[in-house]
Image (cartoon, grey):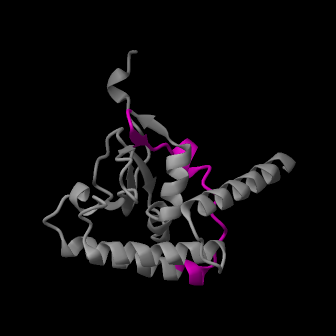
Amino acid sequence: MHKSHQFRYRHEAKKNLLIVPCTSSEKRNYLTCGFFDSKYITLNSTQVIYDPEVYLFAVLSCKMHMIWTKATAGALESRIRYSALICYNTFPFPDINDDQKSILEQHVFNVLDEREQHSEKTMAQLYDPDKMPAGLRKAHHDMDLAIEQCYRLQTFKSDEERLEYLFKLYETMIAAEDKI
């Protein structure tokens, strides 16, 4: 321990960070992700993607990912305990093309613009399902539809159908890894 003063996490962003809180309310319909400048210092209470593509915000902030997270994540009391290893790395998301990424990016900017319209509110206030501003709710709904279009053209009828679909994709993903 002659160098204990040098202990530090060595990942650094050149431009920005996409942050996902490790603990989130089980009542929320979406994870409260956010972009931060590269100078922002994170704590161990967040998961971070360094210099991400913008569309990843849509993937992490969508209903499909929240449904997956609620099914796979651990818990802190009744709250969601998000994990990159368990939630993010196992989330079955299809390969998408640049046009799809561009569509998702526009939805990301719509969500961020709606958040900015209510900058006086905290994330907890913005994402309280009973108090979520209508514009933000619509922006997320539209983003959800765009995400679902990445999976299939037919809309999902229920969260159960979404989760069943995701687990089938997960099984396929694991079977493909086993063949490698």
Q: Residue at x 38, y 54 (%)?
A: 19
Q: Is residue 79 magenta?
A: yes
Q: Residue furthest left?
A: 120
Q: Looking at the picture, tell me which residue is in the foreground, 120 or 15.
A: 120
Q: Is residue 48 left or right of residue 37?
A: right
Task: Pick the quarter of the image with the N terminus.
Answer: top left
- Region of the chain picked out in magenta, as a range: 77-101
The residue closer to the viewer here, 39 or 155, is: 155
Q: Where does the image place residue 160, in percent across and percent down from the top left? A: 59, 58
Q: Establish if 61 lies above or below 49.
A: below
Residue 153 percent coordinates (x, y): 65, 80
Residue at 36% from the left image edge and 61% from the top image edge: 16
Q: How many marks?
A: 0
**Residue 45: quadrant of the picture:** top left
Query: Looking at the image, is 138 positioned above or below residue 161?
Result: below
Name the one closer to the observer, 110 or 101.
110
**Residue 77, percent from left and from top:** 38, 32
Residue projecting furthest to the top: 1
Q: Would residue 160 appear left or right of 14 to someone viewing this image?
A: right
Q: Residue at x 62, y 50 (%)?
A: 90
Up-down relation of residue 114 to residue 33 (above or below): below
Query: Whole-percent x and y of residue 155?
Result: 60, 76
Which residue is pictured at 26% across the width and 70% down the height? 115
Is 74 or 132 nearer to us in this picture?
132
Residue 137 is one of the magenta-drawn residues = no
